Image: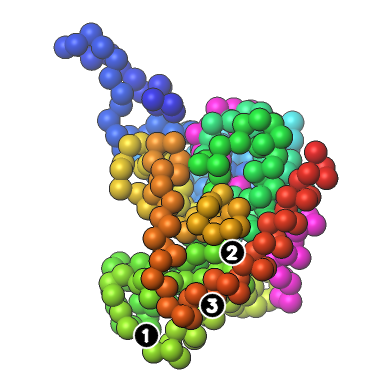
Amino acid sequence: VRGMPVQVRADASAGAVAAPKPGTSTFKVAVLGAAGGIGQPLSLLIKMSPLVQELRLYDIANVKGVAADLSHCNTPAHVSAYTGSGELAAALKDVDLVIIPAGVPRKPGMTRDDLFNINAGIVRTLIEAVADNAPNALINIISNPVNSTVPIAAEVLKAKGVYDPKKLFGVTTLDVVRANTFVAQKKNLRLIDVNVPVIGGHAGVTILPLLSKTRPTVEFTPEEVEELTVRIQNAGTEVVEAKAGAGSATLSMAYAAARFAESCMRALDGDSDVYECAYIQSEVTDLPFFATTVKLGKKGVEEVIAEDLNGLTEYEKNAVDALKQELKGSIEKGVQFAKKQA
Ligand code: NAD
Ligand code: LMR
């Protein structure tokens, strides 16, 4: 099994080689942008995962100290640091999972698309290195604007001849985490029980919580639907404004990205019951990329849960129609950028 050879041991009774027990540390994970606001707490949470055997931290600066610091935690993952483009290949060589929070965050007054000019090039360069050094890895993209950076990554991987749409994910878990939190607060539910699928993309109106599909089943008035939907769509901006120029969500994002990474590793490890929302190449609409619930498996996306789009309320149907225009433009912008540079 890919990613598991290090702990393979001889099975004395059969004379055969047995795989390690599921749930033990077997995976190599690289975090690109590991010294940043998201990168540091995310790396801490990944260091705590029992599934991680090697944690490789890459950044253009300041990453050695982060790695030295984390390496003192008495959890199994071995931590190493890689600084600058000359060390990028070594950071990525044969990893199972690459998580990318590299890039600039928003300041008040900016949209995520305002980050495109800087972050598009960063993601392109990093994905080229992923293609060359870890072509079979699952890729979790956090860098904004996710609606465009994922299509950029897909084009770069295609140009390198290693694109597997089942392995490329835009991380939208923070939208689900926020939806769950806000709904539980509003309806006095136990947080642990609440799940709200969030579909579409990851910017403004493209973020669409499907409140009608909240589990456990719960009734919302039209006013509650409007209030919660708008709050979930603007939650990133809520944090950007509260941080007043010092960046965007980092701690809640690290939490959400660690949850998504853990889900990816559990699926790689053979757990057959792993579902998450994510922004992926998809055929559930006429757009090439769309976030829905997906079932994760040993090869990445095992099943796209198209059912998310069935039985929507009128409010949700109208919101899907409305978000498609913006999402289409963001996808095309990413594809054009990648093609122009190729
Ligand atoms: P930050 O500025 O604190 O950290 C970014 C890190 O990236 C820095 O350490 C920087 O040195 C590094 N970096 C820059 N260029 C790089 C390169 N070429 N290679 C490797 N590393 C590089 O920013 P942050 O708050 O951690 O946010 C990072 C990104 O994540 C932003 O684009 C932000 O908008 C995005 N974000 C996404 C979500 C989401 O839900 N998907 C949530 C929050 C933030
Ligand atoms: C978020 O949703 O918090 C991130 O996309 C960061 C941002 O710019 O809002």
Where 160 sits versus 200, above or below? above
- Amino acid type at mark 3: Asn
**Residue 118 falls left or right of residue 201:** right
**Residue 131 falls left or right of residue 266:** right
Q: Residues within 10 Å of mark 3 (few under 14, many from 20)?
A: few
Query: Which numbered disc, 3 or 1, marks the residue closer to the eye?
Result: 3
Residue located at (53% from left, 51% from top):
282
Magenta-colored span = 89-118
Q: Position of residue 283 (x, y in %)?
A: 53, 52
Whether the magenta-drawn stretch holds residue 116 is answered as yes
Query: Which numbered disc, 3 or 2, marks the residue closer to the eye?
Result: 3
Which of marks 1 and 3 precedes in the sequence?
Answer: 1
Where 149 sits versus 115, above or below? above
Name which quarter of the figure residue 187 lies in. Answer: bottom left
Residue located at (62% from left, 67% from top):
324
Residue sitting nearer the eye, 297 or 235: 297
Give the residue at mark 2.
202
Give the residue at mark 3.
318
**Split into 4 quadrants, where in the image is the N terminus?**
top left
- Amino acid type at mark 1: Phe
Q: Secondary structure at mark 1?
A: loop
Whether the magenta-drawn stretch holds residue 232 is answered as no
Residue located at (35% from left, 36% from top):
269
Extreme-left residue of the structure: 13
Where 222 sits versus 198, above or below? below
Q: Which mark is residue 115?
A: none
Residue 126 appears anywhere in the view: no
Q: Residues within 10 Å of mark 2 (few under 14, many from 20)?
A: many
Q: Position of residue 130 (x, y in %)?
A: 63, 35
CA gap, disc 3 and disc 1: 17 Å
